[in-house]
Image (cartoon, helix red, strand yellow):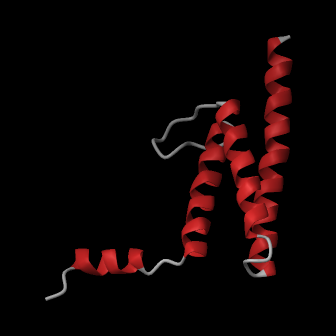
Amino acid sequence: MVTITDQKEEKIVKLSMIELILLSFNTIAARCWARLGLVKDEYGEMRQDLKEARIGIDTLDAILKALNGNIEDEIYRELEGIVSNLKLNYVNQYNKSKGEKT
């Protein structure tokens, strides 16, 4: 007899490395938006932490470079757009934070 738990575990086991990396990419990207202070995090909190955001963005940039040539061009361009938008928003939030401190 196959239980729902068995079915869920079977699905997880069948994830390819690329699928797992893309899942992680999206999770990190969501956390970056939250740490930029632009959306609520998974706990429903608005909290800006630009240092954490920068670490996440740099990590996504490295993942993107590793995926180059290993995923479809359309998906790569989409991920590239996500990283670019995060970088632009990081600079904007960083500049705002510096303006508030002076």
| Residue that appears at 76% across and 54% down | 61
- Name the outermost residue toward the top: 102
**Does residue 3 sit above or below 58 in this rendering?**
below
Q: In this view, does 22 lie to the left or right of 76?
A: left
Above-or-below relation of 89 to 16: above
Q: Position of residue 83 (x, y in %)?
A: 78, 55
What residue do we see at 56% from left, 65% from top? 23
* Residue drawn at x 78%, y 72% as measured from the top left: 76
Left or right: residue 71 compared with residue 87: left
Q: Tell me residue 56's x, y (percent).
A: 67, 45
List x then y, in percent, for residue 71: 73, 78
Name the spot of residue 91 as percent of width and height, x first.
85, 37
Along the viewing direction, whichever of 38 and 50 lies nearer the viewer: 50
Quarter of the figure with the C terminus: top right
User: Is 92 left, or right, of 7 in this rendering?
Assistant: right
Q: Residue furthest left?
A: 1
Number of numbered labels in the structure image: 0
> Which quadrant holds the N terminus?
bottom left
- Observer-nearest of 25 and 33: 25
Write down the quadrant of residue 26 in the picture. bottom right
Quadrant of residue 34 in the image?
top right
Q: Residue furthest bottom?
A: 1
